[in-house]
Amino acid sequence: MGCEEPLVYINAGPHPRVHSKPMSEIREARGTAVTVAVGADYCRYYANTRTVVVGQPRHELARESLRAMDEAYDLAVNSTRPRARFIDVIRKLDSIFEKRVLLDYRIVGYAHGVGLQIEETPITTILPRDRVRRVKPGMVLAMIHSPILLPGLGQVKREDTFIVREDGLERVT
């Protein structure tokens, strides 16, 4: 349907960060995870698009992180419902990361609002007070926003945008 001002975030390098802009001096070895996120807007309203990990991870920790992220994504989508508290979903997600020995690598939180800005409240990864808020119909949420940061290997992230409906979530990306 078009896009006026897309935003592109690329995360690569031995010291992964939550957000990164393209950097011309970074060169990656074969098998290193490179995460590309494209935020597309339509009539000035943003929607996060799914993050893609390019290449085959060269380390078992990265492969395990990909499996954990898929499991966490499914759990977040199935658990985020009207009137649910974000913190209750976060605790469920943490049990996945703990079971796979990845708790120390994940960013706390998992969702943020999307609309006139690519990130707006509630932002459960940045604002602890937003973690205790309840999910409400009409919210537009990007999930699962929190990456698993793997020093020396990159990050693992999977994110889509959803509209919260009274009967559940509608995926729009």
Image: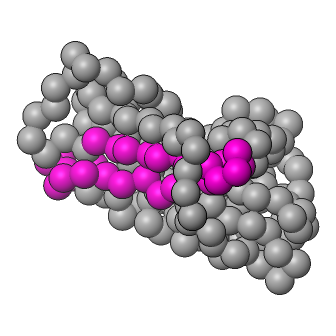
Asked which quadrant contains residue 1, the reply is bottom right
Q: Which residues are magenta?
A: 34-62
Task: Give the vertical position of 99 relative to 16 (above or below).
Answer: below
Q: Quadrant of the C terminus?
A: bottom right
Q: Looking at the image, which is closer to me, 92 or 2?
A: 2
Where in the figure is residue 53, as x and y percent of width and height?
A: 31, 52
- Residue found farthest to the bottom: 167
Identify the residue at image location x=79%, y=68%.
Answer: 164
**Residue, far left:** 30
Where residue 98 appears, as percent x and y from the top left, is 50, 53
Residue 94 visible? The answer is no
Residue 43 included in the magenta stretch of the image:
yes
Toward the viewer: 31 or 128?
Answer: 31
Q: Quadrant of residue 23?
A: top left
- In the rendered image, residue 57 lying in the magenta stretch gets the answer yes
Q: Position of residue 37 (x, y in %)?
A: 44, 46
Give left or right: position of 27 versus 76. Answer: left
On screen, residue 75 above or below 142: below
Residue at image x 88%, y 78%?
Answer: 166
Which residue does the image show at 89% across and 57% down from the upper left?
134
Q: Quadrant of residue 80?
A: bottom right
Q: Residue at x 25, y 51 (%)?
A: 54
Q: Is residue 51 left or right of residue 145?
A: left
Would you say residue 42 is visible in this rendering? yes
Question: Is residue 118 depicted above or below 159 in this figure?
Answer: above
Q: Is residue 88 left or right of residue 18?
A: right
